[in-house]
Amino acid sequence: MKDSIGLQLFLIRIYVGLNFLPYAIQQLFMGKQIRLMVAQVYKQMELPYPEYLVIFVGICMLLAFLGLTLGFFTRLVAFLAFVFLIVAIFLGKHNEAGFFWFMPGGGWEFLAFWSFVCLSFILTGAGKYSIDKKMRQLNLPLLLRFLIK
């Protein structure tokens, strides 16, 4: 039974990480035209420096994808994703659109859900099936040991 919990955590972590990948691809690798379209959306939301924000958001999504999917510096990446998602609720004005994600302007439900899933990985770490687990066996500096605990 105990091993099935480790497997469940692993599968959820993989799925959560994979959910960040399409956003990273869209904002980093689909070309200048797509980046400009996304920047225009950010501009309409009155966000600062929308052209740079596209790259920043893409990098955040890419780090979340890599860290969560591989279980690599999971707590740190989950923390960054958690903060990013909570900030997105307010900067993206999803909090003003109501609760339900399918409403015009998108509500805050979807982002809050994923932020709390990320919070669970901040609290639990990557689990048994992760790079973090393998790295714990190495003699690493104190700060790195803390980040992969």
Image: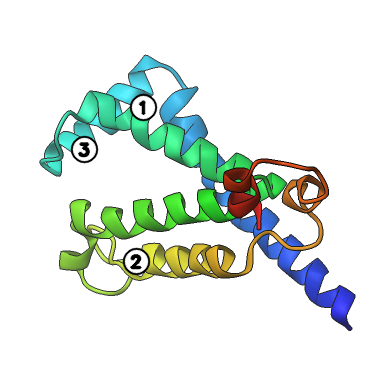
Which residue shows up at 23% across the image and 57% down it?
A: 105
Q: Disc 2 vs disc 3: which is toward the camera?
A: 3
What residue sits right under mark 3 in the picture? 42
What's the distance in space between the residues labelled 1 and 3, CA to CA?
12 Å
Q: Name the secondary structure under disc 2.
A: loop
Q: Position of residue 147 (x, y in %)?
A: 58, 50
Q: Position of residue 11 (x, y in %)?
A: 74, 62
Q: Name the secondary structure under disc 3.
A: helix
Determine whether label 2 and label 3 are within 8 Å by CB. no
Q: Amino acid at mark 2?
A: Trp
Q: Residues within 10 Å of mark 2 (few under 14, many from 20)?
A: some
What residue sits right under mark 1 in the picture? 55
Q: Does residue 89 appear left or right of residue 132 in this picture?
A: left
Which residue shows up at 75% across the image and 61% down it?
A: 10
**Which labelled disc corresponds to residue 101?**
2
Q: Quarter of the image holding residue 102?
A: bottom left
Q: Amino acid at mark 1?
A: Ile
Does residue 17 appear in this view?
no
Q: Position of residue 110 (x, y in %)?
A: 40, 65
Quarter the C terminus occupies: bottom right
Q: Name the secondary structure under disc 1.
A: helix
Which residue shows up at 49% across the image and 22% down it?
A: 29
What's the distance in space between the residues labelled 1 and 2, CA to CA?
24 Å
Question: Mark 2 or 3 closer to N-term?
Answer: 3
